[in-house]
C-alpha cells in the first residue's frame, strides 16, 4: 500500500492544470513559479462555432516545467507491447514516487458520469494503491465534472486502459510525473515583480503571447486566438450570435473565467504576503468584485441548465460589458502605479489615483 501526497489544486478548470497543480500547489518552493504564471488567458475559435477559453501557460506536456524535469512520457503502444503486467507496472511507478497520468475509457471508472453508460476517453491520474482492497486511488473529473478523487479496482483500471478508444494523438501518452524539489541543480525560482508587471501589461493590451514563444510556435498560424481583455469582446459577440441561433453554450468557459479571477485574487494576496508589492486598495476591491460577479454569472447559468428556464442572454452580455470595464479600470490604475514606481517602462496608462 502506498499513497502519494495530493492537495487541492490552485486551478482546476482543465486536466492540464489540475493534475500538475494538485502535486505542487502546497509546496512553498513551487509557489513563486506558480504565482509568476497563469496571468494571461486565450480564447480560440473551434469548429462548429464553439469557443475554447483557458489560461495561457506553458505546460509539462509540451514545454519545460522546472518542477517536473525528471518526468517521463511513454506511448501506449510501448506499454501494451512491452509491459506484460500493467497493474504491477503502475504500482512500481508509485513506489518510485511517480504519479501516473494516463488516458482511459471512463465507462469502466466508477463515479464518473460515463460509468457503465457511455464510452468516453479521458485523463486520470493514479497516485496510490492498496493491495488489501485491490484498488488504485485516482484523481480526475468525476460525476460532478469537478476535480476530485475516487478508487477503482485493479481489473477495472486495466480494462479501462486497454479498451480506451484513441481518437486523438495526445490520448496515446502516459506521463510519469515526479516532483523535482531541487529545481535547477539546487537553484531556487524567485518571484519577479517586473515579470509579473510585464504579464499584467500583456493581459491589459491583449498582447499575442505566441510572440514570446517563437521557439515553439509560428505566431501567425494562431491568428484565431484572442488574448487578455479582448476576450470579453469575443465572448459578448459570441453570446449575441447565440441569441439569434438559439444554440446551447458550454459552461466551461464561464467556469474558466471565474477560475481566472479567483486565481488573480490568490496571486494578489500571495504577492502582498511575501512583501513584493502593496497593491492600491481600489485595484484590490475591483478584483474582489470581479470574482464575485463572475461567480454569480456562472451560478445563474448553472441554474438555467438545471431548471431549463430560458436564459436572459441580454443581461449576461450586459454583465460581461460591466466586468470588462471594471477590470480595465483596475488594470489601468495598477499599470500607472507600476510605471510611476519604475517597475514598467513609461507608457500612457490612465492614472485614476
Image: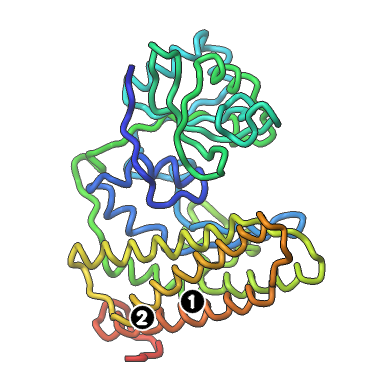
Q: Secondary structure at mark 2?
A: helix
Comparing 258 with 349, the one in front is: 258
Please, is residue 327 above or below residue 247 in the view?
A: below
Mark number displayed over residue 32 = none
Q: Which residue is mark 1?
A: 205
Comparing 167 with 182, the one in front is: 167
Q: Which residue is mark 2?
A: 335
Q: Residue at x 75, y 67 (%)?
A: 242
Q: Earlier in the sequence, mark 2 or mark 1?
A: 1
Q: Is residue 162 left or right of residue 61?
A: right
Res 66 → quadrant = top left
Provide residue 339's location: percent of width, then percent of height.
31, 83
- Viewport quadrant of the N terminus: top left
Comparing 213 with 188, the one in front is: 188
Provide residue 306's location: percent of width, then percent of height.
66, 54
Q: Is residue 332 left or right of residue 156?
A: left
Amino acid at each position: 500500500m502506498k499513497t502519494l501526497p495530493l492537495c487541492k489544486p490552485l486551478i482546476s478548470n482543465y486536466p492540464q492544470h489540475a493534475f500538475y497543480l494538485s502535486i505542487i500547489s502546497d509546496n512553498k518552493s513551487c509557489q513563486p513559479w506558480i504565482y509568476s504564471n497563469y496571468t494571461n488567458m486565450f480564447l480560440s475559435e473551434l469548429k462548429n462555432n464553439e469557443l475554447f477559453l483557458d489560461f495561457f501557460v506553458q505546460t509539462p506536456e509540451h514545454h519545460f516545467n522546472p518542477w517536473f524535469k525528471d518526468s517521463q512520457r511513454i506511448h501506449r503502444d510501448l506499454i501494451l507491447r512491452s509491459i506484460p503486467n500493467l497493474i504491477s507496472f503502475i504500482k512500481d511507478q508509485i513506489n518510485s514516487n511517480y504519479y501516473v497520468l494516463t488516458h482511459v475509457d471512463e465507462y469502466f471508472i466508477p463515479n464518473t458520469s460515463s460509468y457503465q453508460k457511455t464510452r468516453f476517453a479521458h485523463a486520470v491520474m493514479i497516485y496510490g494503491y492498496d493491495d488489501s482492497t485491490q484498488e488504485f486511488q485516482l484523481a480526475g473529473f468525476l460525476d460532478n465534472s469537478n476535480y476530485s478523487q475516487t478508487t477503482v479496482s485493479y481489473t477495472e483500471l486495466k480494462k479501462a486502459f486497454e479498451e480506451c478508444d484513441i481518437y486523438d494523438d495526445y490520448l496515446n501518452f502516459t506521463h510519469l510525473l515526479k516532483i523535482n524539489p531541487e529545481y535547477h541543480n539546487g537553484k531556487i525560482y524567485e518571484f519577479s515583480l517586473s515579470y509579473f508587471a510585464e504579464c499584467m501589461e500583456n493581459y491589459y493590451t491583449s498582447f499575442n503571447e505566441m510572440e514570446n514563444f517563437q521557439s515553439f510556435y509560428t505566431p501567425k498560424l494562431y491568428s484565431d486566438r484572442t488574448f487578455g481583455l479582448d476576450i470579453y469582446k469575443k465572448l459578448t459577440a459570441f453570446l449575441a450570435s447565440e441569441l439569434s441561433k438559439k444554440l446551447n453554450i458550454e459552461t466551461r468557459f464561464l467556469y474558466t473565467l471565474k477560475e481566472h479571477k479567483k486565481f488573480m485574487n490568490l496571486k494578489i494576496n500571495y504577492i502582498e504576503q511575501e512583501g513584493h508589492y502593496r497593491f492600491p486598495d481600489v485595484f484590490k476591491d475591483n478584483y474582489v468584485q470581479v470574482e464575485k460577479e463572475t461567480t454569480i454569472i456562472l451560478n445563474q447559468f448553472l441554474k438555467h441548465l438545471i431548471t431549463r428556464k430560458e436564459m436572459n442572454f441580454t443581461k449576461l452580455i450586459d454583465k460581461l460589458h460591466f466586468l470588462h470595464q471594471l477590470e480595465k479600470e483596475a488594470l489601468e490604475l495598477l499599470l500607472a502605479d507600476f510605471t510611476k514606481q519604475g517597475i514598467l517602462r513609461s507608457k500612457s496608462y490612465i492614472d485614476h489615483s
